[in-house]
């Protein structure tokens, strides 16, 4: 489960959609919305598609019609420059239209989501810019007085009860407080690409704790044993016969291990590409499998 580079942003995009699962019919999510032909890109753009409805989810109460989200992974931090860069993105998004005020400025909000409290930025906004900063609830701060309504969401301060998945999209999780509860919740949703994307990164980021949890808890060990079995089956369905044939020549056990690894890698690649917005045809072409095999992996 260890990797040198973790795909935090796809996991955040999935976690953001999970957070709003009860109000998903009111929202349209776009991952890495491109602002222009130049390399300017918003992490997440959330457009409210139902007029008049008010979002009740705690991290979405600030939302209006067009909501720009900037996400910072645990390895990154939210700086003063980041703050102004994203405000610039919001201004560009409002102005880059065919008609004047096609997107009304008062219908835009900006949200920053970061793992750790941005102390320098908060101090700068409060002391230098004289912005009013209010803590709406644990981990959610509103910045009042700027060109757009702004909120800063601090993941490691969020309530685990109100933001079950997003609050745990970080490192330094505990076994009883986090891993066991995640495994229990994930068991019921393991066939969902959204939950799988989040769970995969969480477990990789907390590899040592996850391994310890598997030793201590039979339910967790069985859950991930099933995951390995499913990965093997997906690999078999997707055409891992070549790997198994080579394995038979060198030993049946080695062949099964190779097929298992290929199957798991292929299944994760397919899910990741689907989360990135690629069509089933594109996934099939890039993975050199059939569309039916793509559908089979996503269905499993």
Image: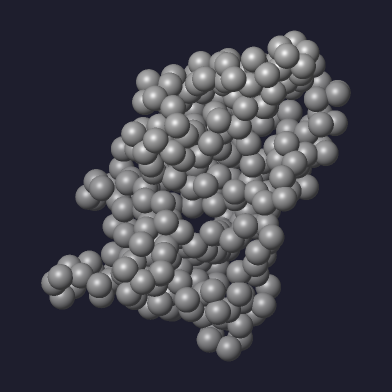
| Residue 210 at x, y percent in the picture | 78, 33
| Residue depicted at x 83% and y 39% | 208
| Residue depicted at x 71% and y 12% | 248
Could you tell me which quadrant the N terminus lies in? Answer: top right
As displayed, is residue 204 above or below residue 294? below
* Colour scheme employed for the rendering of this structure: one colour
As displayed, is residue 36 above or below residue 137? below
User: Left of 248 or right of it: where is 24?
Assistant: left
Q: Residue furthest front?
A: 249
As displayed, is residue 76 above or below residue 256? below
| Residue 272 at x, y percent in the picture | 51, 39
Q: Quadrant of residue 23?
A: top left
The foreground one among 90 and 296 is: 296
| Residue 300 at x, y percent in the picture | 49, 19
Q: Residue furthest bottom?
A: 128
Q: Quadrant of residue 36?
A: bottom left
| Residue depicted at x 32% and y 74% | 92
The answer, for residue 219, to whether it is visible in the render is: no
The foreground one among 10 and 130 is: 10
User: Left of 41 or right of it: where is 258?
Assistant: right
| Residue 132 at x, y percent in the picture | 52, 76
The answer, for residue 51, to whether it is visible in the render is: yes
User: Left of 21 or right of it: where is 96?
Assistant: left
Q: Residue furthest left?
A: 99
């Amino acid at each position: 489960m260890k990797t040198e580079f973790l795909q935090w942003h796809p996991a955040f995009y999935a976690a953001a959609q999970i957070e709003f699962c009860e109000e998903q019919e009111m929202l349209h999510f776009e991952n890495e919305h491109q602002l222009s032909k130049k390399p300017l890109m918003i992490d997440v753009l959330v457009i409210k598609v139902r007029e008049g409805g008010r979002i009740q989810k705690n991290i979405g109460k600030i939302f209006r019609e067009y909501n720009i989200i900037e996400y910072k992974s645990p390895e990154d931090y939210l700086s003063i420059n980041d703050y102004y860069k994203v405000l610039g993105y919001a201004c560009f998004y409002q102005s880059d239209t065919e008609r004047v005020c096609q997107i009304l400025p008062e219908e835009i909000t900006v949200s920053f989501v970061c793992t750790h409290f941005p102390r320098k930025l908060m101090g700068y906004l409060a002391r230098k810019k004289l912005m009013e900063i209010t803590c709406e609830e644990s981990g959610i701060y509103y910045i009042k007085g700027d060109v757009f309504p702004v909120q800063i969401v601090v993941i490691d301060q969020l309530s685990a009860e109100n933001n079950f998945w997003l609050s745990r999209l970080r490192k330094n999780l505990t076994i009883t407080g986090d891993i066991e509860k995640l495994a229990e919740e994930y068991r019921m949703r393991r066939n969902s690409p959204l939950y799988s994307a989040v769970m995969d990164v969480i477990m990789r980021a907390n590899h040592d704790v996850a391994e310890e949890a598997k030793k201590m808890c039979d339910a967790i060990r069985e859950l991930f044993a099933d995951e390995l079995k499913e990965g093997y089956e997906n690999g078999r369905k997707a055409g891992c016969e070549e790997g198994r044939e080579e394995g038979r020549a060198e030993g049946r056990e080695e062949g099964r291990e190779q097929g298992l690894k290929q199957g798991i890698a292929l299944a994760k690649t397919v899910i990741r590409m689907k989360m990135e917005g690629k069509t089933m045809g594109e996934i099939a072409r890039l993975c050199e499998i059939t569309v039916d095999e793509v559908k089979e992996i996503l269905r499993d």
